[in-house]
Amino acid sequence: MDFLIWHLLRDSTRRFPEKEALVHGEERLSYKEVLGRVNGLAAGLRAAGLNRGDRMGIYLDASVPQAISIFGISRAEGVYVPINALLHSEQVMHIARDCEMKGLITTPAKLASLSEMLPQIPSLQFLIVVGRGEAATHLPAHHYDDFCARPKPIDWHETSIEKDPSLVAESFPPILELRTASAFSLFCRLALMPG
């Protein structure tokens, strides 16, 4: 039995690898392309220090990187924390501190607006920056595109209840709660409408 949101993507990719899965503006990706980026991002997140159950913030406008991040964090066994792109830096800091966020995916412009707040988030250990630009920060900053281009590690394993019966939902916090309408609309096209 599958229980993570990225399993929807994996299963759709198995059935329809070349079918269009994600459309945003002029960008169009097949299920195979989306899964490749998701696997790369997940491997990068794990290498950066994201562990099972760690909170990872997504502070992006509705976009392909936002949708990839949702699935990538789930694939890395992290918990994604959606942050409304319209929030002010103090509000973002409150969310990050409250959930003990370990990492944050954002743009250079949004990162600049958070520069004074980042030192006040003790749990924050690394950043993933979407797009090119200066990321002046005291934290390690990785580029989103570099992570998405990573190959899936050879020893990458899939976890499911069928493969490991000791895993039960009560043994770890919820992996994903999809709350934003923009992320949801991208997600629906990707995971729920493969045919």
Image (tube, helix red, strand yellow):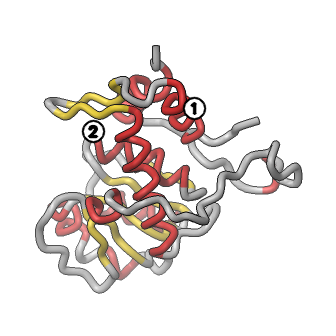
Q: Amino acid at mark 1?
A: Asp
State the residue lying farthest toward the right.
166
Asked whether the residues under the numbered discs 2 and 1 touch, taking CB atoms below 8 Å apart as contact, a structural biologist would say: no
Mark 2: few, some, or many residues within 10 Å (few <14, many ≥20)?
some
Quarter location, residue 156: bottom right
Q: Amino acid at mark 2?
A: Ala
- Label 2: which secondary element: loop
Q: Please, is residue 164 above or below residue 96 in the view?
A: above
Q: Please, is residue 26 above or below residue 52 in the view?
A: above
* Residue 1 coordinates in the image, percent (x, y): 76, 35
Dot label at residue 74: none
- Label 1: which secondary element: helix
Q: Nearer the viewer, residue 26 or 136?
A: 26
Front disc: 2 or 1: 1
Q: Nearer the viewer, residue 44 or 138?
A: 44
**Disc 2 to disc 1, how far (Cα)?**
24 Å
* Residue 108 coordinates in the image, percent (x, y): 17, 64
* Residue 137 coordinates in the image, percent (x, y): 25, 81
Total marks placed: 2
Quarter location, residue 104: bottom left
Q: Nearer the viewer, residue 69 or 108?
A: 69
* Residue 120 coordinates in the image, percent (x, y): 38, 79
Residue at 83%, 52% (x, y): give it. 164
Residue 188 visible in the shown view? yes
Where is mark 1, residue-wise?
A: 11
Drawn side of residue 42 relative to residue 161, left or right:
left
Where is mark 2, residue-wise?
A: 62
Residue at 39%, 75% (x, y): give it. 126
